[in-house]
Amino acid sequence: MTKIIEPKKQSNIFKRPSSETGIWSWITTVDHKKIGIMYGYAAFFFLLIGGIEALLLRIQLASPDNNFLSAAEYNAMFTMHGTTMIFLAIMPISAAFFNYLLPLQIGARDVAFPRLNALSFWIFIFGGVFLYSTFLFGTAGAPQGGYLAEEVSRLGSAPNGGWFGYQPNAGFKYSPGTAMDYWAIGLQILGIASLVSAFNFITTILNMRTKGMRLMRMPVFTWMTFAVSFLLAFSLPIIAIALFYVTFDRQFGTTFFLTEGGGDPILWQHLFWLFGHPEVYILILPAFGIVSEVLPTFSRKPLFGYPAIVFAGFGIAFIGFGVWAHHMFASAISPVAQAGFGLSTMVIAVPTGVKIFNWLGTIWGGKLKLNTPMLFSLGFIGMFVIGGLSGVTHSIVPADTQQTDTYYVVAHFHYVLFGGAMFGIFSGLYYWFPKVWGKMYNEALGKIHFWLMIIGFNLTFGPMHWLGLQGQVRRTWVYAEETNLGFWNLIVSIGAFIIALSILVFMANWIYSKRKGPEAGFDPWDARTIEWSIPSPTPVWNFSKAPEVKSLDDFWHMKYDEDEDGRPVRKEGADALLAELEEEGLNPSEEIVLPNPSYFPIILASGLPFLGYAVIYKMLPLAILGTLLILIGSFGWGTEPLEEEFMEDLENE
Amino acid sequence: MSDSHSYPHEPTGVETRKLGFWIFLSTEILFFGTLITTFMIFKGRDFPGIKLTDVYDIPFTSVSSFVLLMSSLTMVLAHNALENNDQEKTRVWLLSTAMLGAVFLAGQIYEFTEFYHKGFELSSNIFSSTFYVLTGFHGLHVFIGVVLLLALWGIGQRQKGLSLDGGMNLEFVALYWHFVDIVWIVLFTVVYLI
Amino acid sequence: MSVDHKPHPKPAQYVQIALVLGVLTAIEVALYYTEDFVGVFTDPLLIILAVGKFVIVVGWFMHLRFENSLINKFFTGGMILALILFAIVMFERAAANFI
Ligand code: HEM
Ligand SMILES: [Cu+2]
């Protein structure tokens, strides 16, 4: 008989949340699985918004001298597109994977600090809402001395200084109004969310591992989460301070980045890219992790060179801190710095190459099963290689000064971010779909999605290589007829709509299969890692009893032996074992203590946007309200009894 | 926790909360590192207007630095007293730490107003901006520390007294407090003395 | 609670440590006033003293000396990373301004 210990109903001061279904169960949840799902949906919502923004950009550029968007609107759209995709789509969707999978992969019941986890999620939500509230409340006036009068935007005012917020362009003089403040403070809030989750994941990985889960037995996805968390923890503080400076410059008359008062615009670039380059690895490493799980499963071979992949991941993370100035080759940095950073950029291609060869080695000679997750992983390898190669061409400084600020760079980073990170993410979404919902997605629709997407993707971003080399500049709302860039731009725009179509197919598949899909069973892929050794959808308690791990790919070794040629042979008792596992997973035999739900994470998080508005509008009451919410949240948090204390009380009774 | 529980604890041998807290402190290094770097970059430059050297008062700041340094001693004594479960002493040392912290803060406020009256304002020039943002950010940390100390002291008034397990206990407040102190050790040298 | 292997110092020892810290601070302030005699050595000496105080507080008051080496690795790792990165930024900015 399952005994799940009920959460304590009455805490010292407030009544404890106790709903298990309905909206309150989601708002107060601290369950890593629910939080992961919420992260996923929220991020996908922002992905759609960012996608719509991209489509607007592409309609504008589909033909020369077009008038669909005004210059002002174009600036706002490309800024919000980049900001949204990076901070509100890919990062949180990676967080969704971390949340859902990390505890399952290391055999834990939850993350180390479940309430902090909920806090991260809510801060992310409030940060996103705050940033987007610029469309309602923000203003963007005409830049002083700017040559382009900023017209009124039909969409409402939004940040327009680029996702990189270069100074002094993003300062108050050239970006007057409040829109850029929404950007700076919005990113500040989002940064807190990621920072908190980074602490949480590092401690979780180090301290919540189940018996026998030594570091070198952890799945690669867990390793990559570990690396990403370090990158976040050590790079976000830098951008946080830089954003403080921006806010001070814009609001309180300082001149950190403005030459008029002795400040230094290049310092902004340093601080931004000190964060910004680690950030691109924050975006790609989760996809590396996903692909490293999918490829072995569908090749029915162990991952080729597991330690090499792990160390290369950390090599990338480490070297990734030392290449930031390759984004500044066209700025006034010293020649020594240019040479040094050009070299370090070339070096970082080495661990990246190691990974590629490991993946190829994994599929080499394997019995490939070309299901949708596998297709996306294979697509990932191809597209990421192209993006990596164009990246290496940027590392040659004289070449880069030609390429920088052209569509060639846009092609590069979309091949790595979309062809890399997004393809990896889609691969993971299909791969773990049956784990999360217990249902199987529709394979035919999945394949249609893949083929539409890879065709649309290459049509969209392939031609940008030569458009850029022909001199089309990025961040510019029109090009003239005489440039003869019209044809390929049209193709690019058509490609963008094909991608949009593929996303619709994906959504249809998701919605349909989640309801009506066939039962998946708990190990549909004959998988290797222990998250597949428990029932699907995952029970609230994850593992009914802490699993004991004996090797890398533990679940696989429960099912398979090797013959003399190293070929896998299914063990005799394998099926019986699986049935037993499922039975046990659904009916835990020991008491289960789950972390209690709590109101306070969302209360605490809700204070931050008010502080943001208070800074922008210099309104004391808002500041007081924000502080109060934070204080109430922290006080309630601090006085809420923990599960352990509750257990003790129970024993004393 | 009951024995029927198969879940193991902390394979690294470090308590989970402590581990998390130290990672937090490690990242704080980068917060302050960025601020200090900015300060150093501008310190090496020529800029118009009033300079920090025109306004500061080394004897005064030395005394308040000493006060903050000694608050680390009272903090560690409070920690030590609690380890020996001496509630009385713990409370006394906690309160003295909070008081020393408050004295430091008062000194900082006095210093800021003095500077301000001498015309050294937040937006006077790049140098005054870096000064106020850097030392202000540290001051904010001290302020939060004082609030935490007082909260602990308040909790310590209860029947049960304080203990070293559960939540944001004295050990973490102490770590935080010492961290704020070491930041000031660096700032005192970098900002005032060099 | 965590089990420490080496015993923490006693209150009397803490007071001695604090005395050392106080003396070091006094030397710092004195150095500031004797810059004319000490000359170019002033700044390096000041930095050494600050580092010394830093290490004492972290090692003894924060008990880092007595903790698991994992924590030590994180903290020192963060320090080293910050020092390298920010040193590069500072040198780059200085070079760009004077060369
Ligand atoms: C082999 C590895 C890579 C190398 C050598 C490399 C190199 C570069 C260089 C030198 C630039 C600057 C180009 C310029 O502005 O002129 C650049 C831009 C960029 N890269 Fe990469 N890159 C690599 C991988 C990645 C990855 C994995 C991502 C993301 C997942 C990424 C995302 C970006 C982004 C977003 C930009 C443009 C930033 C902007 O200006 O807005 N890169 N890359
Ligand atoms: Cu980069």
Image (cartoon, rainbow, N blue to C red):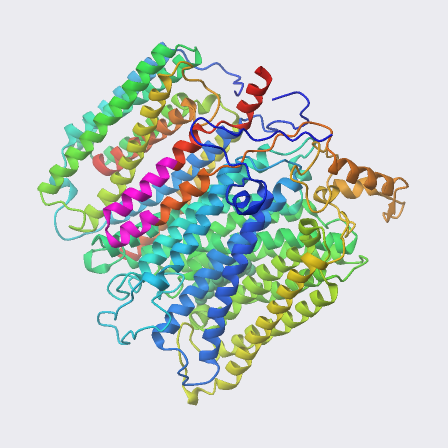
Does the magenta segment cover residue A626?
Answer: yes
Question: Residue most toward the bottom?
Answer: A482
Relative side of B129 to A302, left or right: left
Residue B14 appears in the figure: yes
Q: Residue at x 47, y 87 (%)?
A: A484
Q: Give coordinates of residue A185: x percent, y percent.
A: 35, 53
Q: Residue at x 27, y 45 (%)?
A: B39
Q: Main secondary structure of the magenta part?
A: helix
Q: Give coordinates of residue A400: x percent, y percent.
A: 45, 68
Q: Give coordinates of residue A581: x percent, y percent.
A: 79, 38
Q: Give coordinates of residue A471: x percent, y percent.
A: 44, 79
Which quadrant holds the C terminus of chain C? bottom left
Front-most of A628 and A276? A628
Residue C90 appears in the figure: no
Query: Residue B113, relative to residue C19: is it above or below?
Result: below
Front-most of A571 and C8? A571
Q: How many marks?
A: 0
Query: Residue B109, relative to residue A395: is it above or below?
Result: above
Does the magenta segment cover residue A158?
Answer: no
Front-most of A269 and A369? A369
- Give the quadrant of residue A479: bottom left
Relative side of A147 to A506, left or right: left
The magenta region covers A610-632
Query: Residue C42, relative to residue A57: is it above or below?
Result: above
Query: Residue B19, relative to residue A19: is it above or below?
Result: above
